[in-house]
Image (spheres, helix red, strand yellow):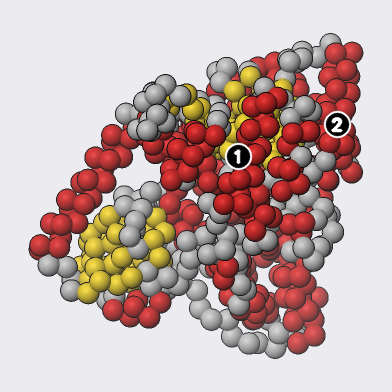
């Protein structure tokens, strides 16, 4: 028996036999071609087929994991259409007179190596994505059918692989895959994200220890601890069976809290809302007892389209969410594109430091027609529920006033057109920069509510890129400077008589729940899967102690 240590990627415990998985697909041979035009035409046709296949996978994954996690395959489409990637393939065909398969593989290898050498764990995780799209393109060139995935497994097993691509992961039959363990990979890889959403216990990044795993071997996988126990004794198996039973009972007890309000022992009420990316995510929010939607990331509507979504398309999505929430409050954030969220058809400029660049409200106030279309869709939808509109990346009073001015102009136009809307819709802002926190006293007289985005607030306050794992110890959402800015912001909201919530990742940090309650935070907005744990923590808190 040996205990191997990896990275905890997806919680839960599983025991069973290992099936070593080797990805399908042969290495492309270097072959000289004569007709460059014909070869690039082959490539173009293969890309069209690959993009069509990705769209089909996206639609399938919507049913399995919801809109937000399905965006992985929309990102794959964007990567395949990226001019640097596709241009490199064509250049190899044209200049080197090599076959398209070899050009794709060579380019994929080059891009994968670039990603693998980046400082950011998140960006290193994109290595698997570029490998995935390159394999897909080669399969389309060779006429190979199937996804090269794990859908053909007959008996329940624990899949062990050097690395799994998102396409391979989404193709698994959950009834046959007990767990996933990999030699490479990170917690932030798209494959790890999918395994978490699908509820498959996973340990990644075993590195050299992966060599100790053999085909047919009995193992235990603890996805919460990030451990793999090879050839466990009966005593160890019994220990983990009890641990698994305890985990199951814990989840069952949590589920009982779905219908309860988060009220502390001394009577303090905390609203616990859900963060969502599309109407399809509302079901999970309601099943977990969300009091409302604290953050609807509207940018996902833009990212899944090939062109700007129309006013009617946006209206339909917003209306659906509001109707499904049946009167519960829904905060919809206006377009927050830029930085790590790309939309090719917007033709945004390449920037040296996009996190500090042309993004979010800066784009909306610069491209007013884009902004007005969204505001019209939002206001039309407001007639079907309780809508609150939130403006992101605000750093000045003038930005708030300009955004509100556009909103008032839209209201006036809709009134003139006799289109129904709720005239009392509240307009709030995200506090996600030190500038906004410091000016929160002035902002509180301009906005109807605050929602503190702790992800960006932390990285901007600490000058620490949240995607760079080399400084992950510095990126600390519990840092005193960050907590002081939050407390100062909440205090200013209270003085002005408006509400203040948290919608960043730290909202789900139960180690901060009591602090947030003490300083007067009105609501926490978290992923649907975290709602019950936050409720449990609030219910057990007594602020009199």
Task: State the CA–CA distance, disc 2 to disc 1.
Answer: 25 Å
Tell me if mark 1 has few (under 14), some (14-19) or many (20+) residues whose alpha carbon lies within 10 angstroms of its own: some
In the rendered image, the vertical position of residue 300 relative to residue 43, given as above or below: above
Foreground of the two, 249 or 459:
459
Q: Which residue is mark 1?
A: 487
Q: Residue furthest front?
A: 545
Residue in view at x 75 percent, y 52 percent: 338
Quadrant where the N terminus is found in the figure: bottom left
Percent coordinates x, y for residue 363 in the rendering: 83, 46
Quadrant where the C terminus is found in the figure: top left
The number of numbered discs placed on residues in the rendered structure image is 2
Q: Of callouts 2 and 1, which one flags the residue occurring earlier in the amino acid sequence?
A: 2
Residue in view at x 53 percent, y 81 percent: 27
The image's mark for residue 401 is 2
Percent coordinates x, y for residue 530 in the rendering: 44, 41
Tell me if mark 2 has few (under 14), some (14-19) or many (20+) residues whose alpha carbon lies within 10 angstroms of its own: few
Residue 27 in the figure: left or right of residue 494 = left
Q: Residue furthest top?
A: 418
Element carrying mark 1: helix
Quadrant of the rendered structure where residue 169 is? Answer: bottom left
In the rendered image, the vertical position of residue 2 relative to residue 296, given as above or below: below
Residue 145 in the figure: left or right of residue 534 = right
In the rendered image, the vertical position of residue 6 relative to residue 391, given as above or below: below
Percent coordinates x, y for residue 270 in the rendering: 49, 27
In the rendered image, the vertical position of residue 394 relative to residue 108, given as above or below: above
Quadrant of the rendered structure where residue 22 is? Answer: bottom left
Residue in view at x 61 percent, y 59 percent: 466
Percent coordinates x, y for residue 67 in the rendering: 57, 42
């Amino acid at each position: 028996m040996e205990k191997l240590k990896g990275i905890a990627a997806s919680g839960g415990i599983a025991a069973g036999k290992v099936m070593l998985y080797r990805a399908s697909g042969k290495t492309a041979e270097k072959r000289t071609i004569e007709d460059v035009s014909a070869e690039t035409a082959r490539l173009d046709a293969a890309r069209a087929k690959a993009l069509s296949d990705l769209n089909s996978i996206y639609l399938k994954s919507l049913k399995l994991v919801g809109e937000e996690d399905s965006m992985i395959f929309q990102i794959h489409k964007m990567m395949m259409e990226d001019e640097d990637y596709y241009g490199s393939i064509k250049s190899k065909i044209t200049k080197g007179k090599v076959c398209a398969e070899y050009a794709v593989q060579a380019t994929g290898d080059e891009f994968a190596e670039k990603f693998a050498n980046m400082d950011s764990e998140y960006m290193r995780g994109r290595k698997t994505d570029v490998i995935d799209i390159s394999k897909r393109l080669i399969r389309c060139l060779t006429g190979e059918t199937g996804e090269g995935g794990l859908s053909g497994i007959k008996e329940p097993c624990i899949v062990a692989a050097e690395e799994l691509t998102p396409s391979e992961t989404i193709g698994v039959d959950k009834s046959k895959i007990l767990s996933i363990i990999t030699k490479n990979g990170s917690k932030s890889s798209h494959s790890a994200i999918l395994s978490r959403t699908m509820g498959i216990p996973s340990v990644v990044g075993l590195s050299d220890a992966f060599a100790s795993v053999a085909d047919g071997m009995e193992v235990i996988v603890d996805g919460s601890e990030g451990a793999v126990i090879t050839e466990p004794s009966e005593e160890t198996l019994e220990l983990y069976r009890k641990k698994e039973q305890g985990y199951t009972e814990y989840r069952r007890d949590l589920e009982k809290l779905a219908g309860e309000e988060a009220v502390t022992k001394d009577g303090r009420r905390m609203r616990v809302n859900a963060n969502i990316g599309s109407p399809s995510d509302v079901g999970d929010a309601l099943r977990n007892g969300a009091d409302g939607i604290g953050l609807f990331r509207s940018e996902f509507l833009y990212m899944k389209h090939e062109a700007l979504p129309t006013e009617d398309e946006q209206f339909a999505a917003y209306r659906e969410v509001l109707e499904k929430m049946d009167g519960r409050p829904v905060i919809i954030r206006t377009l927050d594109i830029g930085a790590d969220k790309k939309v090719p058809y917007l033709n945004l400029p390449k920037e040296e430091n996009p996190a500090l660049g042309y993004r979010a409200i800066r784009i909306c106030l610069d491209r007013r027609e884009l902004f007005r279309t969204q505001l019209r869709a939002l206001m039309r939808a407001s007639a079907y529920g309780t809508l609150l509109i939130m403006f992101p990346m605000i750093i000045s009073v003038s930005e708030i006033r300009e955004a509100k001015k556009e909103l008032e102009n839209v209201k006036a136009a809709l009134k003139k057109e006799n289109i129904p809307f709720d005239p009392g819709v509240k307009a709030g802002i995200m506090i996600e920069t030190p500038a906004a926190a410091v000016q929160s006293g002035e902002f509180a007289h301009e906005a109807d509510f605050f929602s503190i985005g702790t992800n960006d607030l932390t990285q901007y306050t600490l000058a620490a890129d949240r995607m760079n794992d080399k400084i992950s110890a510095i990126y600390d959402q519990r840092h005193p400077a960050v907590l002081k800015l939050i407390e100062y912001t909440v205090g200013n909201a209270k003085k002005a008589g408006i509400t203040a919530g948290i919608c960043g990742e730290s909202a789900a940090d139960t180690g901060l729940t009591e602090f947030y309650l003490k300083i007067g935070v009105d609501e926490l907005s978290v992923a649907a899967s975290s709602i019950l744990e936050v409720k449990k923590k609030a219910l057990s808190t007594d602020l009199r102690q």
